[in-house]
Amino acid sequence: MTRPTQAALPKGGQDAGKSESLCVSCHVTFSNPLRQHNSNSRESQRCLLYTLFNLFLTLNTQNSQSPTMDETLKEILGRHRNALVRYINPTPSLINVLVEDKVLPSAMIEDIKKGNSRREKNEILLKSMKLRGNMSYRKFREAMLKCGQVFIADLLYEEEATGSLVDENDILSVPSLKLSLTPEEIKQLVLTLDAR
């Protein structure tokens, strides 16, 4: 079913464990992503991959929500610091998503708003992100995608998606996927995610 407005979208990853997944860019809720989405649409495929990627990351990190960010995630932000500072566009809509999804607390958001230039705002944003936890990093990537800053989202997703992302057991551990996908579709999904 198509969602009528942006306001109707769920916040953050609240629905990550439920049987439906949210397609952020086209605002469609689907319970069987391979059958409901047009497989020829590149944007739909990207959206499907991001949704499934976040679902599996959420399932794999539910018990590891540490108050500080893992060193590997900090290194990713550090490695891409120049590109992030240069290309993130700290628009009011991005700031609103960061607040709504609780990526950063209001004090850090106010510090970002006080920046005099785009570059300064982005420097403050990255310093603030490194002080947050792993879920904030993942929500930050989602915020980039929601606000149309796909280049930044791609950069951060690709950096973390090394090695084999999932296997069939990961997919079978999600009841809605287990019930709605055939064995061939599960194998195709694993291959698609690994290729990503």
Image (cartoon, helix red, strand yellow):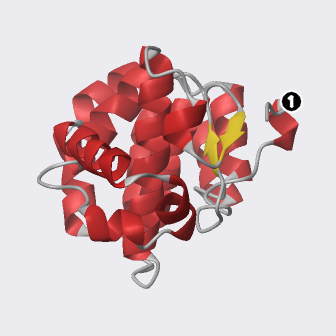
Q: Quadrant of the C terminus?
A: top left
Q: Residue furthest left?
A: 163
Residue pictured at 42% horizontal, 28% vertical: 46
- Residue 188, by quadrant, is top left
Q: Height in image: 146 above or below 75?
A: above
Q: Position of residue 19 (x, y in %)?
A: 64, 62
Work out whether residue 37 or residue 5 is closer to the camera in this orientation and state it: 37
- Amino acid tagged 1: Thr
Q: Sort mark 1 into few (<14), some (14-19) or many (20+) by Cα contacts within 10 Å.
A: few
Q: Height in image: 118 above or below 16?
A: above
Q: Is residue 156 left or right of residue 99?
A: left
Work out whether residue 36 or residue 132 is closer to the camera in this orientation and state it: 36
Q: Is residue 157 left or right of residue 132?
A: left
Q: Quadrant of the N terminus?
A: top right
Q: Height in image: 77 above or below 27?
A: below
Q: Position of residue 177 (x, y in %)?
A: 50, 59
Residue pictured at 37% horizontal, 73% vertical: 60
Residue 124 visible in the shown view: no
Give the number of marks: 1
Work out whether residue 115 or residue 130 is closer to the camera in this orientation and state it: 130
Q: Position of residue 107 (x, y in %)?
A: 66, 58
Residue pictured at 59% horizontal, 62% vertical: 16
Work out whether residue 93 or residue 118 is closer to the camera in this orientation and state it: 93
Task: From the image, tell me which residue sits under label 1.
Answer: 5
Q: Position of residue 110 (x, y in %)?
A: 67, 47
Residue pictured at 86% horizontal, 38% vertical: 7
Classify mark 1: helix, strand or loop: loop
Residue 85 visible in the shown view: yes
